[in-house]
Amino acid sequence: MSHFTPAALNWLCLILEERFGLNFHLQPSQDGLMLTLTDHDQGSIYFPKLEAAFHESRSDLPFTQWDASVEWWESVLGEPLPAPGVATLPKPLIERQAQQAIIHYDILGLTYWVLNRVEEIDRTDLDNHGRFPATSSHAFKHGYLERPVVDEWLHVLGQVIQKQWPQVELKQHQFSMKVSHDVDAPSRYGFSSTKGMIRGMAGDVLKRKNFKSALTAPFIRLNSSKKLHPADPFNTFDWIMEQSEQHGLVSAFYFICGRTDASKDADYEPEHPAIRELMRRIHTRGHEIGLHPSYNSYQAPEAIAAEAERLRAVMREEGISQNILGGRMHYLRWEHPTTLQAWNDAGMSYDSTLSYADLPGFRCGTCYEYPAFNSVTQQILKIRIRPLIAMECTIIAERYMGLGYGKEAESKFLELKEKCRKVKGCFTLLWHNSHFANQEDLTLYKQILDSRSTRNNND
């Protein structure tokens, strides 16, 4: 019995069309699913066993692995593939007959379960920010969080498609990289209250031993009324854009446009003259402006809509026009599918929240952007999901992985980037503009960008 609704099958066909560049048809057949090409009368790929668990919100699914090479198929990463949802797999896993290939693993169910974050719906095992943590996930528990498991299985499916219909040509993808920057604090002191400035100065002296920053604080605050001051340690925007331009990348800067928690949200307003000037400068240089919804908006669709409109209003007033408007949730706070639906209803083009704060990797099992689907309402959405693979503080900060700035941290970033390269996907990196306070940050960021060539994909 198929657990898929017609809308879910249509969405899966969209996923396959984007990946392979072909028009597919999916229909229930006996207890499984039959995949056919709409432009070809003959041949099919049959999935005889569908897993009910791929439609359930739980992390206690069984797990095994499949060694593709034993059956003369290619594993794109050269390792056995993680196979969530089953404890054992039949041999051979893939059978080929005259007009039909049979795949005895529910690749389509896995794709549905992982891309739509079914595992996370209505969960209560959350962290102190109300986030579903990596450590609660099936991927972490079974050691495949740093594997693009959906991309790996779709690579296998692509091989089967090519064998089944040798006359068709599969879509070819190229590795790309996208960098984005959450503008939590565009200025170290420019928008703070007098009390906040004094507290910051004390921190500079006592915690960071940065006497120069403390001494220049009042001057920077006084001279930030129309433009961010060049000496402001958080005013790294021109440097960031220079780095992106040198590597053929477009930086996306996501601005906070609301305040639902005074202690967690920004101390600036998007209408401030200095922020307007910054947005104009970003746009003039060909980079992107986006939204960073406030701390408590992730469960409040009306707040996300209002903050999105506030950003649009500022952009209109400044003559800034973009074909797309995307962004990311503050603190990576996310309730699925509530937050996703709110982004969609606010008319946003894409969201790039979906990574875990506590560990980097492939929360969505992919490094490809894809059309969103609400598995609760069973509706294909207009918004696209752009998975986030790594956030700088996830790897660097003591409160998370705590790898600091040495070789171990660099290796982790580059290892994730290389996996994205192998599956010809997109390595998405978040690095806050306020996280370039020391030379170690600058050096590590440049090393990540410099590591082999990157090609930006702005499709």
Image (cartoon, grey):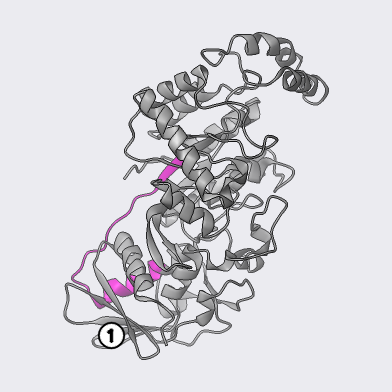
**Is the residue marked by circle 1 packed among few (<14), some (14-19), or many (20+) residues within 10 Å?**
some
Q: Quadrant of the N terminus?
A: bottom left
Give how far across and how far down residue 45 sits, in percent: 31, 80
Q: Nearer the viewer, residue 31 or 446?
A: 31
Q: Which residue shows up at 17% across the image and 76% down it?
A: 40
On whether residue 161 falls in the magenta region, the answer is: yes
On whether residue 312 falls in the magenta region, the answer is: no
Q: Nearer the viewer, residue 446 or 372?
A: 372
Q: Quadrant of the C terminus?
A: top left
Q: Which residue shows up at 33% across the image and 66% down it?
A: 16
**336 to the left or right of 21:** right
Give how far across and how far down residue 163 sits, in percent: 27, 75
Secondary structure under tag 1 reads strand
Q: Which residue is mark 1?
A: 100
Quarter holding residue 247 = top left
**300 to the left or right of 8:** right
Q: Is residue 161 visible?
A: yes
Quarter holding residue 279 = top left
Judge whether 433 appears above or below 403 on screen.
above
Q: Which residue shows up at 52% across the image and 64% down it?
A: 117
Judge whether 287 appears above or below 157 on screen.
above
Q: Is residue 78 visible?
A: no
What span is colored magenta in the figure? 154-178
